[in-house]
Image (tube, rainbow, N blue to C red):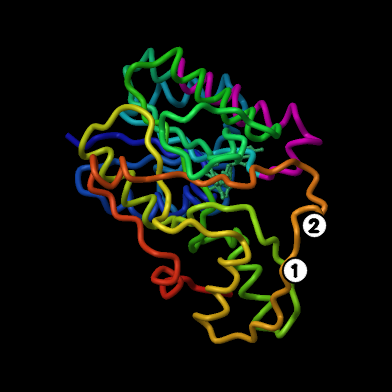
Amino acid sequence: MKIKILLLGRFGRVGDALFKTLSIMPGVDLFVFSSYSLSKKHIWGNNFIDINILDFVALKKEILRIEPRIIINCAAFTNVDEAERKKSECWNLNVTLVEKLAQLSSSLEAHLIHFSSDYIFNGNSGPYYEDAKPNPINYYGKSKLASENIILSKLNDFSIIRTNFLYGNSDLYNPTFVNSVYNNLKQGKQINVVNSLYSCPVFTKDISIGVKELILQQFSGIVNFAGPEYLSRFEIALKICDFFKFDKNNIKEANISDIGFEAKRPIKAGLNSEYAQKKLGIIFNNFSDCLNEMNFK
Ligand SMILES: NC(=O)c1ccc[n+]([C@@H]2O[C@H](COP(=O)([O-])OP(=O)(O)OC[C@H]3O[C@@H](n4cnc5c(N)ncnc54)[C@H](OP(=O)(O)O)[C@@H]3O)[C@@H](O)[C@H]2O)c1
């Protein structure tokens, strides 16, 4: 019998990569909840269920009907600046939804895989290991930490995957910093890039292969998924420039105070992924190696 996996957030950056990996994983019956499904059901198949995942009555009914063995939550409110203005929207998606999923996972004895962020840390001393003490400095980070705490208090069988700055390809174009740098430099435009905001850039395809491995090895607990290099935004932009042989003079170094972000950001964020590599054998590739696989539009 096939194992039923339910995916939420399929058209997000991580969800898209996961969909591609899990939909061809042997022995898996993949179900998807997305508000994009109805009009395109003929393309995406019967296991696409058109649902507003924030309608918690409908969510419960559908999950109890499907009885998944694994629930993967990639849905989230991810706009860090907007989260400061739209606090209740952010909380509903990042915390209340997770609480409902944890309750349902508990009653079905399902394994919940949830994504969290390096923004649960204050950014004074990254890259962070799994056991570092969280101390978020913006609302998005607070909501992600609250989601972790709910899972820790309600479930024994769960995976919390913390990740950080990510980039990759997606069916519905979800541009990241990497796309924006590429597009501007390709057009010969000058860009100001902050010389801090450190993280460990990770390719969404590597994340998806990591999730597959975690499922196969029946992992439970907290684990970091992050790339092997520790880079500032400026260094990331320079790598893109080098790779595509764009004009370096078009990248201007800026201080974080010059950018005027709404939300405070952890300066030395990022995650150390030694544990995922050693314990689970997951490989996270270098940034420049993955640029080869990007389909820039
Ligand atoms: N992006 C990053 O750099 C980053 C860094 C660290 C951690 N993370 C974490 O990684 C996870 C995945 O992030 P991501 O970048 O892939 O997210 P994303 O691209 O912003 O996608 C999030 C998905 O959430 C769903 N969603 C958003 N708003 C919704 C709403 N109002 N109602 C219902 N569904 C809604 C949508 O799913 P559908 O497509 O199904 O409609 C959307 O595609 C999140 O938990 C995030 O906190 C991301």
In the rendering, at what x and y percent does residue 149 appear? 51, 19
Q: Residue at x 73, y 37 (%)?
A: 83
SS type, badge 2 = helix
Q: Does the residue labelled 1 lie within 8 Å of ligand 1?
A: no
Task: Say the numbered circle drawn on residue 192.
Answer: 1
The C terminus, quarter of image: bottom right
Confirm whether the magenta stretch covers residue 89. Answer: yes
Going by the image, does 271 lie left or right of 232?
left
Q: Residues within 10 Å of mark 1 (few under 14, many from 20)?
A: some
In the rendering, at what x and y percent does residue 199 appear? 53, 52
For the record, the magenta segment spans: 79-103
Mark 2 sits on what residue? 259
User: What amino acid type is highlighted by mark number 1?
Assistant: Asn
SS type, badge 1 = strand
Q: Main secondary structure of the magenta part?
A: helix
Label 2 close to label 1 by CB (< 8 Å):
yes
Q: Which residue is drawn at 70% across and 32% down?
A: 139
Q: Which residue is drawn at 42% across and 49% down?
A: 226
Quadrant of residue 72 within the rendered picture: top left
- 297 or 7, which is in the foreground? 297
Q: Which of marks 2 and 1 is nearer the N terminus?
A: 1
Going by the image, does 234 lie left or right of 107?
right
